């Protein structure tokens, strides 16, 4: 078994935590796991990615181009930036909430167009405003948890959502547990009936 | 009893050190090395370890050396450029050796992701005659750390454990043993001429040091028989592939469809190079492909052995043009390089292929560039902007221009648009000395006079700023020093430093006051100000720049990444005139311009109010007031 997940976002969105949660759940489910994270200067509002490689064998932590089975984009442009990593049969879960670049002269950014491009490139892509979902549940900061829960809910992970919640329960401090449970449940509810590529194929 | 845990490579190293019985730990933070010390610190009390953050890497190494002279098990941690700072004690230490054990953790940063250089610590091991271990995974990092302590004690030499970013900052499932607190008796320091370096001592020690290199090289060749860090496997062709560290995993994945064709050579012991094992491997093949990041270090070792033993072998790597000479490697780079070499060899045996991506890179539409920038509400933005304004005023009043020398830390990001406030940046502590050097030339593009300003952070000030201040004052350099004191070592993960009043272990400590240090160094104008009122900051920046001779301002604030914000601001659309000054002047990541042309402040606002202070129509107001 080999399953590669790439998580892309902007520094501060919780990409590193999302990859730790997935990696720990994968280990609990009995797999070897290797992650590569962006830590340091690039974290300061820059483009960041985490690679999570799950499987039966130990391997290097960087996913080769075209090998990712799942791309989780916490931001539309960041999902698009990393699309070269997604395999032809790969799935994608993308947050519709766009983060506009602060610095002037960074080029035009039309998130709607990028979302269209993503859906065209990868039929069956699951998109939703997970930041709004998290905010409605209590904190916009839990968009990362919402997205990995959505991936689990849509059956896009190589382990069940119980492993994921088990890890969240262990790793999230008690005072934030209730809000994360709400985010987790709402995200799973939001993707009910969606199953990524399979749905696309059925249509 | 062993247990499996998800650990970052750096955490695995810390647990390896604790398991090996480390008693003293020192270091200076630096990406990607910092979590080794942080993990040791968080377990220090539990296992009776003394752990500290030193003011810089030289001091950290010397502290660990002292402990090791006493017979203690010591570790010192730093990033690759930190080893440059520590190189003075390092170069002398190899002649003297140690008594207890000393492991030097050095993290290299191919890319680089968060560093000034792409230097290779394997070469530093060669240069300083200190053995280097090069783990490829967090599991190997854990196991090698334990072995490094053993080897250091057995051979009475310091041992470098060299990681790269992907090993240090990657997480994996790691099997670790149960760690029990053990008795920590340290033998104690024994007076011996061995500890006092002197030309005569070095003439005695140097031959022994060279002899030790040969013994260790032979020892590491032996590892191929029983230690998984060093391994060889035989393939069906006359082509071999050699790699060390994380590159060995990239190489293995690159050739997985052609398994069995290539002979493989993996060395976790980078220096001294296991020459005997390498020779045995080379004599049975006609072509050798070397996959390694950073320097062509292994490639040069193989070339040397080929020359020494007159082997009829072609060696393909960076020097032969098959592999990139710089940058981080991955599986795709390994495939490209191996294919390039196979093409040169004229091998019919196989050609490696990349996986097909869902979308080609050229089909992705243009995307916004998202360069790293100062956080929303960062105090550095206020200070940079204040100096920008003060410099503009100075230029308009006197025609004198200003040059801004930066330093290493979050505030290097002051170079980003639209601030553009870092004109030079070289290495830790260099800002002040470079500003001094510029001031002594008294000239700025075609003989124009220029005012020199140096920015330096609080932790960097203690690291290597003080000697530069003393030299600037002593030599009457006309510079202004702006200390950006956010009360933490922010970029590397908020470690404490001597200005804070607490040690790494959490004990109260004497606060070393930066303004008092500046005064005692002879800086005549020293001012301290909170960096929250922009107008006051502009005034004091202007005053300092116009002061004749060395002047300094300590700007104080709190890092927004660890301190709760003070509420949020919003734009009152009725008052906003759409001038977008708030966007164009700062590059604050919390503000962006909507398609309507009006600015919007996002949830990431931490309430510094800097934008409100320059809004000409008072349209930026605290959130609660407007609601």
Image (cartoon, rainbow, N blue to C red):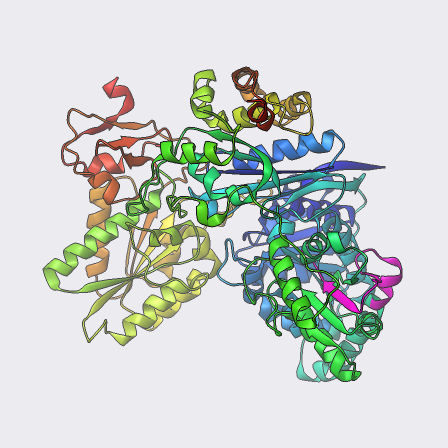
Front-most of residues B223 and A8: A8
Residue B283 location, quadrant: bottom right
From this viewpoint, which residue is outermost toward the right?
B225
Name the residue rendered at 36%, 64% in the picture: B432
B536 horizontally vs B554: left or right? left
Q: Is residue B69 visible?
A: no
Q: Position of residue A66 (x, y in %)?
A: 59, 45
B424 horizontally vs A170: left or right? left
From this viewpoint, which residue is outermost toward the front?
A203
Task: Determine whether A10 is above or below B546 in the image.
Answer: above
Front-most of residues A132 and B581: A132
B236 in magenta: yes
Name the residue rendered at 19%, 76% in the picture: B447
From this viewpoint, which residue is outermost toward the left?
B397
Front-most of residues A197 and B597: A197
Name the residue rendered at 62%, 74% in the picture: B320
Identify the image quadrant of the N terminus of chain B: top right
Front-most of residues A122 and B466: A122
Q: Position of residue A137 (x, y in %)?
A: 47, 16
Residue range (magenta): B221-246
Task: Determine whether B254 is above or below B501 in the image.
Answer: below
Q: Is residue A109 visible?
A: yes
């Amino acid at each position: 078994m080999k399953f590669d997940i790439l998580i892309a976002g902007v520094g501060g969105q919780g990409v590193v935590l999302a990859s730790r949660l997935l990696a720990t759940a994968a280990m609990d489910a009995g797999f070897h796991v290797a992650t590569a994270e962006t830590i340091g200067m690039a974290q300061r509002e820059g483009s960041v990615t985490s690679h999570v490689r799950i499987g039966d064998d130990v391997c290097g932590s960087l996913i080769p181009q075209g090998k990712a089975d799942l791309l989780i984009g916490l931001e539309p442009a960041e999902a698009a930036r990393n699309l070269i990593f997604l395999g032809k049969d790969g799935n994608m879960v993308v947050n519709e909430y766009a983060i506009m670049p602060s610095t002037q002269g960074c080029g035009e950014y039309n998130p709607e167009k990028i979302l269209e491009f993503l859906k065209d490139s990868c039929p069956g892509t699951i998109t939703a405003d997970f930041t709004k979902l998290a905010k409605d549940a209590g904190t916009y900061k839990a968009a990362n948890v919402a997205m990995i829960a959505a991936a689990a809910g849509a059956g896009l992970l190589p382990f069940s959502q119980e492993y994921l919640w088990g890890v969240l329960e262990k790793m999230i401090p008690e005072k934030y547990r209730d809000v994360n449970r709400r985010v987790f449940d709402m995200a799973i509810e939001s993707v009910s009936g969606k199953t990524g590529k399979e749905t696309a194929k059925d249509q | 009893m062993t247990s499996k845990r998800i650990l970052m490579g750096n955490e695995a190293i810390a647990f390896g050190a604790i398991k090996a019985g480390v008693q003293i730990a020192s270091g200076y933070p630096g990406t990607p090395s910092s979590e080794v010390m942080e993990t040791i610190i968080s377990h220090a009390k539990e296992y009776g370890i003394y752990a500290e953050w030193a003011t810089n890497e030289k001091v950290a190494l010397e502290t660990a050396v002292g402990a090791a002279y006493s017979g203690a098990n010591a570790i010192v941690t730093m990033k690759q450029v930190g080893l440059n700072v520590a190189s003075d004690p390092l170069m002398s230490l190899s002649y003297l050796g140690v008594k207890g054990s000393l492991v030097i953790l050095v993290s290299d940063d191919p890319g680089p992701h968060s560093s000034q250089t792409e230097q290779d610590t394997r070469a530093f091991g060669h240069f300083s005659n200190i053995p280097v271990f090069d783990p490829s995974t967090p599991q190997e990092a854990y196991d090698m750390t334990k072995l490094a302590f053993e080897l250091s004690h057995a051979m009475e030499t310091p041992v470098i454990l060299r990681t790269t970013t992907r090993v240090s900052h990657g997480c994996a499932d790691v099997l670790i043993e149960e760690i029990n607190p053990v008795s920590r008796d340290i033998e104690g320091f024994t007076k011996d001429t061995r500890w006092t370096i002197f030309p005569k001592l070095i003439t005695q020690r140097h031959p022994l040091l060279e002899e030790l290199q040969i013994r260790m090289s032979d020892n590491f060749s032996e590892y191929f028989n029983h230690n998984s860090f060093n391994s060889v496997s035989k393939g069906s062709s006359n082509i071999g592939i050699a790699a060390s560290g994380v590159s060995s995993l990239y190489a293995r994945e690159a050739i997985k469809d052609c398994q069995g064709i290539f002979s493989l050579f993996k060395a976790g012991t980078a220096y001294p190079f296991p020459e005997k094992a390498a020779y045995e491997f080379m004599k049975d093949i006609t072509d050798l492909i070397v996959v390694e990041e950073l320097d062509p270090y292994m490639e040069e070792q193989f070339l040397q052995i080929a020359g020494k033993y007159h082997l009829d072998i072609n060696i393909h790597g960076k020097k032969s043009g098959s592999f990139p000479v710089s940058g981080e490697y991955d599986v795709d780079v390994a495939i490209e390089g191996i294919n390039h070499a196979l093409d040169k060899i004229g091998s019919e045996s196989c050609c490696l292929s990349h996986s097909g991506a869902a979308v080609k890179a050229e089909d992705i539409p243009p995307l916004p560039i998202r360069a790293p920038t100062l956080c929303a509400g960062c105090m550095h933005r206020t200070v940079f902007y204040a100096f920008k304004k003060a410099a503009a005023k100075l230029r308009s009043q006197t025609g004198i221009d200003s040059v801004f020398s930066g330093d290493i830390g979050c505030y290097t990001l002051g170079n980003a648009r639209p601030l553009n406030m870092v004109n030079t940046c070289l290495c830790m502590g260099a800002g002040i000395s470079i500003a001094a050097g510029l001031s002594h030339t008294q000239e700025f593009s075609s003989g124009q006079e220029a005012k020199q300003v140096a920015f330096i952070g609080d932790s960097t000030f203690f690291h290597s700023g003080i000697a530069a201040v003393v030299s600037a004052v002593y030599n009457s350099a006309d510079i202004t020093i702006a200390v950006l004191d956010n009360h933490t070592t922010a970029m590397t993960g908020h470690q404490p430093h001597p200005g804070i009043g607490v040690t790494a272990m959490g004990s109260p400590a004497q606060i070393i006051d930066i303004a008092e240090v500046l005064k005692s160094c002879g800086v005549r104008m020293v001012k301290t100000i909170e960096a929250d009122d922009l107008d006051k900051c502009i005034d004091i920046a202007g005053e300092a720049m116009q002061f004749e001779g060395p002047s300094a301002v300590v700007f104080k604030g709190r890092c927004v990444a660890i301190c709760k914000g003070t509420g949020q601001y919003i734009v009152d659309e009725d008052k906003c005139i759409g001038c977008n000054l708030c966007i164009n002047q700062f590059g604050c990541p919390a503000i962006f311009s909507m398609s309507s042309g009006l600015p919007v402040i996002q949830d990431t606002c931490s309430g510094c109010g800097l934008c409100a202070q320059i809004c000409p129509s008072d349209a930026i107001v605290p959130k609660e007031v407007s609601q």
